[in-house]
C-alpha cells in the first residue's frame, strides 16, 4: 500500500513537471524572438546581464570640422558636423514596466534608384528615455561605430546586451555614412576616426559630476572600449594607434581634390603619434576594412598597442581575409590580440539579422545581404559575438578573469569550447597572440 502511494505521488510530481515544462516551452514558442535573444545553443556569456536597459537619442555637434565634400584643392571649407548617437545604459525601471522599445530604421541607400529608402521598425528589449540606474558608481563606456552604409541601430543585439551587463554603450550614426544620408566615400574616410574620438570626449563631458545631463556621474570615460564594424573597424584601429600609411594619404588626396586633411591621422605625422588615448582600454574590430587597399603598412600597425579582439569571416569579400583582416591581426605585433574566424562566412559577421521586410519578393538582394550571411545563421553569429565580446571587454574594463573562455587551443573543434553547449562550437577558430614588446 505504501509503495502504491509513493508511486502515485511520483506520478503526480511527474505530471506537474511535464505540465510546467510544456508551459515554458509554449511560452518560448509564442514569445517574439527579438534581436539578441538566446538560441538554444547560445554560449554562456551571451545571456543578458542583471540590469534593465534604458535607451535615448542624442544629437551632437562637432564644431569646426573640414567639410571635405565641399572643399576644393587648396581651400578647405569648415563646418559644424552633426552626429546623432544612440545611448544604452543600465536603467531604473519601476516594477511592472515592460522592457520593450521600437526602433525606426530604413532599408536602401539614399540616391540609389535601385535601392530606394524603405522604412521599417523592429523591437528591442529596452525602455525609451528611462532614468539611469540610481545609487551606482559610474559605468565603463563602450563606443560603437557602424559600417558604410549602416546606422546606429545596426548592432542592437550587442549594444543592448552589453548595457545589461553594466556598461554605457553609445552607437554613432556617422553623417554621410548611414542608409538615410549616404554620401561620397571621402567623408567616411576622413571623419570615421574623428567622430569616434569626439563622441568619447562628449560622453566624458556628459558623464562629469557637474553635468546637467541625466548621465551625470554615470559614465566612466577613463575606462573605455571602442567597437567598430567594417569602416567602423577602419576607424577604431586608427583611434587606438594604428596610423594610416602615407600611401593612404596620397590615395585620399586623389579622391578629395588634393586635400591633405587626413594627414593628421597618418602614422608618419608627429602630431598623430602624440595622440595616444589612455582612456581606451580595449578594441573590438569586426571585419575592419582597408588592409588590401594599402590603408596600413607595417609601421602603422606597430602603433596598435591596445588589447584588440578581431572578428572575421574566412571568405570576407569586402575587407579580405588572408591579405586583409588576418594580415592586420598578424601585423599588429605590439598588441595583445585575438582573432575569431567564422569558417566560410563573408563580411556580415556583425549586424543584426535581416528584418522581415528584407524577405519581401522583388527587393534588391542587397537589402537581405546587408544583414545576412550565405552560410551562417545570423542569430548564431550574434550569440557567439555577445559571448566573446563580453569575455574580452569584461577582462579589460572590469578586470574579470575570463581566460577560460578566451584561451582556446588551435584546431580544437574536436572538443567543446568552454562556455559552449555540447557539439555547438564547430566551424570557428580563435587565435591569440601576445605582444612582441
Image (cartoon, rainbow, N blue to C red):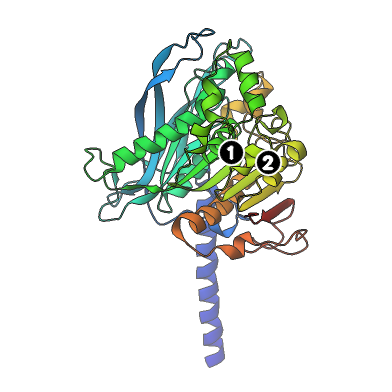
Real-space Cα distance between discs 2 and 1?
A: 10 Å
Rendered image quadrant of residue 100: top left
Q: Residue at x 42, y 48 (%)?
A: 163
Q: Is residue 117 above or below residue 276?
A: above
Give the quarter of the figure containing the N terminus.
bottom right
Tag 2 secondary structure: helix
Taking 185 as reference, is 430 left or right?
Answer: right
Numbered label attached to residue 328 = 2
Whether 401 is drawn above or below 305: the answer is below
- Which residue is tagged 1? 242
Q: Is residue 171 left or right of residue 355?
A: left
Position in image of residue 37 (x %, y %): 53, 48
Image side of residue 79 versus residue 184, left or right: left
Q: Residue furthest front?
A: 270
Q: Looking at the rendering, which quadrant does residue 42 occupy?
A: bottom right
Q: Count numbered badges in the picture.
A: 2
Q: Is residue 21 visible?
A: yes
Amino acid at each position: 500500500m505504501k509503495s502504491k502511494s509513493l508511486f502515485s505521488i511520483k506520478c503526480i510530481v511527474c505530471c506537474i513537471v511535464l505540465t510546467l515544462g510544456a508551459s515554458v516551452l509554449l511560452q518560448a514558442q509564442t514569445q517574439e524572438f527579438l534581436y539578441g535573444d538566446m538560441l538554444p545553443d547560445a554560449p554562456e556569456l551571451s545571456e543578458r546581464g542583471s540590469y534593465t536597459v534604458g535607451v535615448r537619442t542624442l544629437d551632437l555637434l562637432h564644431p569646426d570640422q573640414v567639410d571635405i565634400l565641399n572643399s576644393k584643392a587648396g581651400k578647405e571649407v569648415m563646418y559644424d558636423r552633426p552626429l546623432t548617437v544612440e545611448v544604452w545604459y543600465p536603467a531604473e525601471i519601476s516594477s511592472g514596466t515592460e522592457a520593450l522599445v521600437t526602433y525606426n530604421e530604413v532599408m536602401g541607400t539614399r540616391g540609389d534608384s535601385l535601392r530606394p529608402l524603405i522604412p521599417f521598425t523592429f523591437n528591442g528589449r529596452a525602455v525609451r528615455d528611462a532614468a539611469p540606474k540610481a545609487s551606482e558608481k559610474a559605468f565603463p563606456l563602450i563606443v560603437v561605430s557602424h559600417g558604410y552604409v549602416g546606422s546606429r541601430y545596426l548592432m542592437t543585439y550587442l549594444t543592448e546586451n552589453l548595457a545589461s551587463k553594466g556598461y554605457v554603450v553609445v552607437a554613432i550614426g556617422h553623417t554621410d555614412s548611414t542608409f538615410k544620408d549616404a554620401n561620397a566615400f571621402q567623408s567616411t574616410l576622413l571623419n570615421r576616426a574623428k567622430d569616434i574620438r569626439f563622441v568619447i570626449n562628449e560622453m566624458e563631458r556628459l558623464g562629469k559630476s557637474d553635468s546637467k545631463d541625466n548621465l551625470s556621474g554615470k559614465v566612466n570615460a577613463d575606462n573605455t572600449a571602442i567597437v567598430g564594424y567594417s569602416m567602423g573597424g577602419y576607424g577604431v584601429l586608427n583611434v587606438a594607434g594604428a596610423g594610416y600609411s602615407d600611401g593612404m594619404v596620397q590615395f585620399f588626396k586623389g579622391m578629395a581634390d588634393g586635400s591633405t586633411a587626413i594627414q593628421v591621422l597618418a602614422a608618419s605625422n608627429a602630431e598623430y603619434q602624440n595622440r595616444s588615448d589612455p582612456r581606451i582600454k580595449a578594441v573590438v574590430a569586426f571585419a575592419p576594412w582597408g588592409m588590401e587597399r594599402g590603408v596600413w603598412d607595417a609601421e602603422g600597425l606597430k602603433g596598435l598597442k591596445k588589447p584588440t579582439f578581431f572578428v572575421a569571416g574566412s571568405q570576407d569579400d569586402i575587407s579580405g581575409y588572408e591579405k586583409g583582416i588576418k594580415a592586420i591581426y598578424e601585423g599588429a605585433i605590439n598588441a595583445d590580440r585575438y582573432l575569431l574566424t567564422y569558417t566560410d562566412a563573408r563580411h556580415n559577421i556583425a549586424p543584426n539579422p535581416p528584418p522581415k521586410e528584407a524577405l519581401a519578393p522583388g527587393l534588391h538582394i542587397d537589402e537581405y545581404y546587408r544583414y545576412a550571411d550565405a552560410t551562417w545563421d545570423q542569430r548564431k553569429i550574434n550569440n557567439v559575438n555577445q559571448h566573446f565580446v563580453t569575455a574580452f571587454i569584461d577582462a579589460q574594463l572590469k578586470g574579470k578573469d575570463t581566460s577560460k573562455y578566451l584561451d582556446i587551443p588551435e584546431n580544437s573543434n574536436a572538443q567543446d569550447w568552454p562556455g559552449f553547449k555540447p557539439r555547438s562550437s564547430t566551424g570557428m577558430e580563435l587565435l591569440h597572440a601576445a605582444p612582441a614588446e
